[in-house]
């Protein structure tokens, strides 16, 4: 199903003594570009989180922000470094003995050593249980995002079909006009020669036919029209595909533009030139919309 690349989703879940909120924003990008903002305590789960997201979305810039709240607990905790505490006590005892100080050191002096007691972010007791909460919140956000992307994708699909229909109409104009080009060249060449030749002189019909055939061959666009129609048909079929189609549609548009540019340069006829301009205009709008498809 066709999907847009812009959406926003939010998920929330509780468990393992914590509440996790996941907010996901998706934007246009040629490839999958995932940016995570996680609490430090969730860093061990980053790889699993990336895998979960990439299984649900294959293209676009993704900005996933996760917040963690411990229920009934502070997000930070005091941590005692027992090894450092023992070393600090030994140092103070050595100072007391060296200087023959009459009073023993106090616990305030002991705790004055940096990092003996530090304030740190709380570490989860059970990462597996916390992963279940994180995965649940993230999946909620992913489901909302994918629903929005599908809805906007259907809207974009209707827009693309309308513009493709307009292009087909202009291609038909070009095709009909191209069939008339040999006769148009004959009429123009005959009129021009009549102006240039002295009165009473006639044009050699065989030579005229040769010149008309030469001009018609130089401006023949039958192959370009056939390839253009083939690309249009492939574009229509791709719109019905289930997989990601954005990059394929972008490629087909490049091929369509290549053919229409060749048609414009070879035909050199006013009505065809106007149709080419219309097709280029619609093609540019198609390209802008295709850039937003997964």
Image (spheres, rainbow, N blue to C red):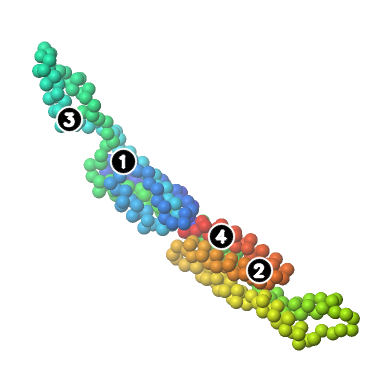
Give x and y (percent) for residue 155: 54, 58
Q: Are marks 4 and 2 in contact (CB under 8 Å)?
A: no
Nearest-to-viewer mark from 1 and 2: 2
List the residue tagged with mark 2: 264
Give x and y (percent) for residue 210: 72, 84
Is 86 on the left or on the right of 33, as rendered?
Answer: left
Q: Secondary structure at mark 1?
A: helix
Task: Give the quarter of the image for residue 198.
Answer: bottom right
Q: CA distance from mark 1 to mark 2?
A: 59 Å
214 or 44, which is in the foreground?
214
Q: Height in image: 251 above or below 38?
A: below
Nearest-to-viewer mark from 3 and 4: 3
Q: CA distance from mark 4 to mark 2?
A: 19 Å
Neighbourhood count class around disc 1 (C-alpha, 10 Å): few under 14, some 14–19, many 20 upward: few
Name the residue furthest front: 198
Task: Give the quarter of the image for residue 285.
Answer: bottom right
Q: Are marks 3 and 2 in contact (CB under 8 Å)?
A: no
Q: CA distance from mark 3 to mark 4?
A: 64 Å
Nearest-to-viewer mark from 4 and 2: 2
List the residue tagged with mark 3: 84
Sequence order check, earlier mark of 3 and 2:
3
Q: What residue is at 60 percent from the left and 60 percent from the top?
A: 284
Asked whether the viewer can see residue 75, the reply is: yes
What label does residue 29 carry, if any?
A: none
Q: Secondary structure at mark 3?
A: helix
102 or 74, which is in the foreground?
102
List the residue tagged with mark 1: 40
What label does residue 287 carry, if any?
A: 4
Sequence order check, earlier mark of 4 and 2:
2
Sequence order check, earlier mark of 3 and 1:
1
Q: CA distance from mark 4 to mark 1?
A: 41 Å
């Amino acid at each position: 199903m066709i999907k847009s690349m812009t959406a926003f989703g939010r998920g929330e879940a509780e468990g393992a003594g914590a509440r996790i909120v996941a907010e996901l924003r998706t934007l246009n990008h040629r490839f999958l570009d995932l940016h995570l903002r996680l609490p430090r305590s969730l860093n061990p789960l980053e790889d699993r989180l990336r895998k979960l997201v990439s299984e649900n979305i294959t293209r676009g810039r993704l900005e996933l922000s996760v917040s963690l709240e411990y229920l009934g607990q502070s997000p930070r905790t005091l941590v005692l470094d027992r090894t450092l505490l023992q070393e600090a006590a030994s140092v103070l005892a050595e100072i007391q003995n060296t200087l023959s100080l009459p009073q023993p050191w106090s616990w305030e002096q002991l705790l004055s050593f940096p990092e003996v007691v530090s304030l740190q972010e709380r570490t989860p007791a059970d990462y597996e249980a916390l992963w279940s909460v994180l995965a649940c919140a993230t999946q909620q956000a992913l489901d909302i995002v994918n629903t929005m992307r599908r809805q906007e994708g259907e809207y974009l699909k209707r827009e693309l079909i309308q513009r493709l229909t307009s292009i087909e109409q202009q291609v038909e104009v070009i095709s009909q006009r191209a069939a008339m080009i040999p006769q148009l060249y004959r009429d123009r060449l005959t009129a021009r020669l009549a102006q240039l030749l002295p009165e009473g002189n006639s044009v050699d019909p065989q030579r005229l036919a040769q010149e008309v055939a030469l001009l018609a061959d130089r401006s023949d666009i039958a192959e370009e029209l056939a390839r253009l129609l083939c690309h249009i048909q492939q574009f229509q079929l791709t719109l019905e595909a289930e997989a990601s189609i954005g990059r394929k549609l972008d490629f087909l548009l490049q091929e369509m533009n290549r053919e229409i540019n060749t048609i414009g340069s070879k035909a050199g006829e006013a009505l065809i030139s106007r149709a080419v301009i219309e097709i280029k205009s619609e093609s540019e709008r198609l390209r802008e919309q295709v850039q937003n498809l997964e």
